Amino acid sequence: MLAIYKRELKAYFQSMVGCVFVAFLVAFTGIYFTAYNLNAGYPYFSYTLSGSLIVFIVGIPLVSMRSFAEERRNKTDQMLLTAPVSLTKVVLGKYFAMVTVVAIPNLIFCLFPLIIKMNGTAYLKVDYISIAVFFLLGCVYVAIGMFMSALTESQIIAFISTFGVLLALYLWNGIIGFLPSSAVACMIGLILILSLIVLYIYHMTENWMLGAVLEVIAVAGCAIAYIVKSSLFENLLSKLLGKLALADVFTDITNSHIVDITGIMLYLSVIIVFVFLTIQAIQKRRWS
């Protein structure tokens, strides 16, 4: 895993992708820092950092698009799949290399609150927690981008699909506002979501019996729950899908200075899920 990590990290900076990402994120944040913290005298760097979320939407797909798509296009993925290293270590090696690229600008950001402190009042605890959560959110986005890259051999498709997902997550609060609130509509929506999950399981296992059983369980379970207590489904889609507003965990710190521990656990859970899905996607290709 260490050899793969070193190779990937070296490749990011030899191809200038890592340098461009770090330079652009630091420069973009530096402009906000100069405007808000130095010129306007706002004491919280966390507020400035929230303006850099938009950079992640473009920058993270740029970093993650080549992780597996390039290997697959160049047919070098066969060497990885037959290497005397477990597939989990291959995936983690690539993931940690991308995380390191994301970590570099965040380490630079640690200097900014100190600059504020040198010029007046600063809230170092809030600022450093916000930097840590900002970095963790970047790790979540990297895991999503890596999974998208594992599904295709085209870096362009990997970039566009990751960009689309991250943009949707960025606008998530506005999107869920269009969801229906009635019990019947929420039940149907929940069945559709569960059916998509079942479809993915079928795609990964190619076991139609397992897919059919899971689909029956999902539909029957929703129908029975609706008959027993239909009020459970009222606004259910908004409540469930509202949890996917990942940026809210970070913006709660910048706006209200509140650290949501459950949000941190959500970030870690999403990372684990997408790393696992990446491993399974590649594992399927190995045996197909």
Image (cartoon, rainbow, N blue to C red):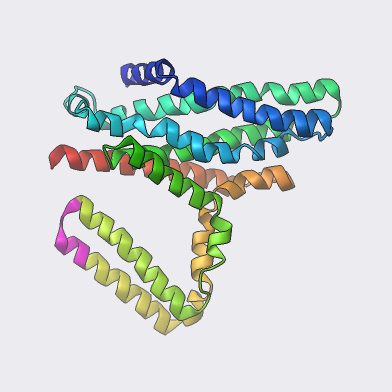
Look at the image and tell me whether residue 42 can be seen: yes
| Residue positioned most to the front | 156
Residue 177, image x and y in percent? 57, 66
Q: Main SS type for the magenta part?
A: helix
Instruction: Tell me the quarter of the image containing the N terminus.
Output: top left
| Outermost right residue | 120
Reply yes or no: does residue 48 show up in magenta: no
Residue 109 percent location from the top left of the image: 65, 25
In the displayed orientation, state which residue is furthest to the left: 288
Q: Is residue 272 something that shows in the picture?
A: no
Q: Is residue 22 left or right of residue 124?
A: left
Q: Nearer the viewer, residue 204 or 167?
A: 167
For the image shown, how many numbered marks are present on the structure? 0
Location of residue 106 in the rendering, given as x and y in whole percent from the top left corner: 59, 26
**Near-viewer residue (152 or 218):** 152
Q: Quadrant of residue 77?
A: top left
Residue 2 to residue 140: above or below: above
Residue in the image at 55% along x and 43% along y: 264
Q: Is residue 278 above or below residue 244?
A: above
Q: Quadrant of residue 86?
A: top left
Residue 152 is left or right of residue 265, and the answer is left
Q: Between residues 158 and 288, which one lies in front from this camera angle?
A: 158
Q: Please state, as top left, top right, bottom left or bottom right, where the C terminus lies in the image.
A: top left
Q: Which segment is the magenta one?
A: 205-212
Above or below, 160 against 185 in this view is above
| Coordinates of residue 130 in the picture (x, y in percent) | 65, 36
Residue drawn at 23 percent across, 32 percent down: 72
Does residue 206 show up magenta in the picture?
yes
